[in-house]
Amino acid sequence: MTDRASGCAVALVLAIVGGVAGCGAAPGAAPPKAAVGAVGALVVSDGRIAEPIGANPAVLYFTIGNRGLSDDALVAVTVEGAGRSDIHRTSRRGSLAWMEPAAEIAIPAGASVDFAPGGNHVMVQGGEKRLRRGARVSVRLVFRRAGSLDFPVPVLVYRDLDRVLAGAGKGARQRPE
Amino acid sequence: MVAIVGAGCRQAGEAPPARALGQQYRGQIREVPSPVPDFTLPDTAGRPFAFAREARGHVTLLYFGYTHCPDICPVHLANLSAVLADLPWDLRQRIRVVFVTTDPDRDTPQALRRWLDTFDPAFVGLSGSVAQTNVAQALLGIPPIVREDRGPADYAVGHAAQVIAFTPNGQTRVDYPFGTRQADWAHDLPLLAGNASGGS
């Protein structure tokens, strides 16, 4: 079910980013609805941060579409006003959910990769003063091939994630064992 | 997808058969009914919270997680708090959220209380030892807590991703996997509560 949900999300995001103007863009395709930045063949959309609760970590989500012919990878993330940002993936081990650090996340050619609840995400620590609801902060993504990209990301509260994710058709649904 | 359990003839005034209820829930009703687990852990005020006894008469939504979890735990609790805030007061009083920490070293009762209060001060927080919590998890078919160290004071904790709901009469367990939307909760919480008035 997770795979199917991810597949649907990938298809949706490909549809969204598929029309970005530039070399290789599909003719007549619609412009992206939520793209917030592009570097090389990579298009980033749907950036959002959930406000940290107390001194606990915040979380950063977004989507990266790779419209090029070469694979790439996200290797680092920095968030304005935060002390440390770690790339994570949430995976399953039996009936347990497990948050694992990832040195990098592959962004294959022609694919779209979601950072969304229950899957890939960026854990952001030390940002409790700056990352408040309603703020917009600058996020930098560093890619192995394409270089880096800075883009603004709004901060919202966890309860609002449901609404924005439902609108984008995202968020992994997992089955209990 | 909802599993179906056995149905039977229904007399006037009896609870709807499990088959019908199972088809109505958006959560996943367990094929094999499991008893409400009988464990006791201290709450955030240090009082013993006897789960099976406390669950009687309430819809009880049980979740195991930890406050340093940025991705799954706060999403579940935020969704629940948003939906509960919109329910009629009398229905809200019949639903109880119980959060058991799987990280008692960092989640002191005070820290857990502060964290839960940001969602809903009515949420119950339980913080026992790892051994005590493992006993509770085992009663629900959840493997023991595993902690993965990543450096000084830095570690992750594997935890169950689903919220486990028990109806007020303790007859039905419905699991809500991660990804359950607020709309799903808004649909199912009245059903879970109604199960008691129908035949507990």
Image (cartoon, coloured by chain):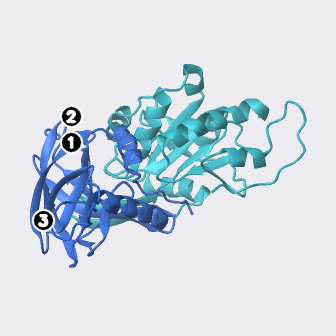
Q: Are marks 2 and 1 on the same chain?
A: yes
Foreground: A100 or A155? A155
**Helix or strand or loop: what does disc 3 sit on?**
strand
Q: Crowding at label 1, few (<14), some or many (≥20) Cα neighbours within 10 Å?
A: some
The chain displayed cyan equals: B
Mark 1: amino acid = Pro
Q: Which chain is blue in the picture?
A: A
Measured Cα–Cα span from mark 2 to mark 1: 7 Å
Mark 3 Cα shell of 10 Å, populated few (<14), some (14-19), many (≥20): some
Are labels 3 and 2 assigned to the same chain? yes
Residue at mark 1: chain? A
Residue labelled with disc 3: A142
Q: Say what secondary structure mark 2 lies in.
A: loop
Query: Could you give the CA–CA distance between mark 3 and mark 2, rounded to whole angstroms?
Result: 25 Å
Please tell me how crowded label 2 is: few (under 14), some (14-19), or many (20+) other residues with Cα within 10 Å: few
In-front residue for pair A166/A126: A166
Which one is earlier in the sequence, the residue at label 2 or at label 1?
2
Quarter holding residue A147? bottom left
The quadrant in which the C terminus of chain B is found is: top right
- Name the amino acid, label 3: Val
Circles 2, 1 touching at the beta carbon (< 8 Å): yes
Question: Disc 2 marks which amino acid?
Answer: Gly
> Residue A55 in the image: x percent, y percent?
22, 42
**Identity of the residue drawn at 34% across and 43% down:** B108
**Numbered circle sitting on residue A154:** 1
Helix, strand or loop under label 1 = strand
Q: Determine the CA span between mark 1 and mark 3.
A: 19 Å
Residue marked by disc 2:
A134
Work out whether A161 lies above or below A95.
above
